[in-house]
Image: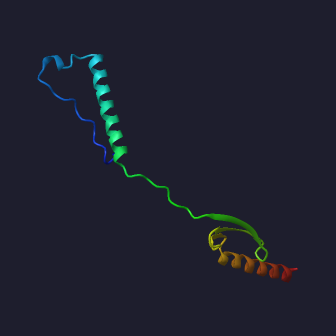
């Protein structure tokens, strides 16, 4: 997985000084791990400080209403904007409620005709 904007960890700096060359073993491995961790923490701190501030989206003030459509004999859920009282969403939709009501009426007529 690649994360854009974060550079890979740099290789340790090379030096001609023989005392700075790794002598092998666990001590040099721990030093290398500590150096890489320090670089990673610095990169993370830089990324966080340069990232733009995120703002939470402003959500409309709404309320939920639950009612029963008598013709369709179904529950209806509506989301209404509190500021202006306009309906934001409805489930089932008005078209679905009409379809349910018509289906219920036709099914009732069919049952009466067969009886």
Q: Quadrant of the C terminus?
A: bottom right
- Residue 7 on image: x %, y %: 28, 42
Which residue lies most toward the left here?
Answer: 16
Which residue lies most toward the right here?
Answer: 115
* Residue 21 vertical placement versus 45 (above, below): above
- Residue 50 on image: x %, y %: 34, 47
- Residue 32 on image: x %, y %: 28, 25
In the displayed structure image, the side of residue 81 where residue 29 appears, left or right:
left
In the displayed structure image, the side of residue 60 where residue 92 appears, left or right:
right
Residue at 75% in and 69% down = 67
Q: Nearer the viewer, residue 100 or 38?
A: 38
Residue at 41% in and 52% down = 53
Is residue 1 visible in the rendered structure shown here?
A: no
* Residue 79 vertical placement versus 16 (above, below): below
Is residue 35 visible in the rendered structure shown here?
A: yes
Residue at 57% in and 64% down = 60
* Residue 88 vertical placement versus 105 (above, below): above
Q: Quadrant of the N terminus?
A: top left
Residue at 26% in and 19% down = 28
Quadrant in which residue 93 is drawn: bottom right
Total labels drawn: 0
- Residue 75 on image: x %, y %: 74, 68
Quadrant in which residue 40 is drawn: top left
Colour scheme of this structure image?
rainbow
């Amino acid at each position: 997985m690649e994360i854009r904007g974060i550079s890979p960890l740099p290789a340790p700096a090379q030096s001609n000084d023989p005392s700075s060359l790794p002598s092998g073993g666990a001590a040099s491995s721990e030093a290398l791990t500590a150096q890489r961790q320090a670089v990673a923490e610095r990169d993370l701190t830089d990324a966080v400080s340069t990232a733009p501030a995120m703002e939470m989206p402003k959500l409309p003030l709404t309320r939920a209403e639950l009612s029963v459509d008598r013709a369709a004999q179904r529950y209806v859920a509506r989301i209404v904007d509190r500021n202006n009282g306009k309906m934001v969403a409805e489930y089932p939709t008005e078209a679905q409620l009409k379809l349910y009501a018509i289906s219920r009426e036709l099914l009732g007529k069919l049952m009466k005709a067969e009886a």
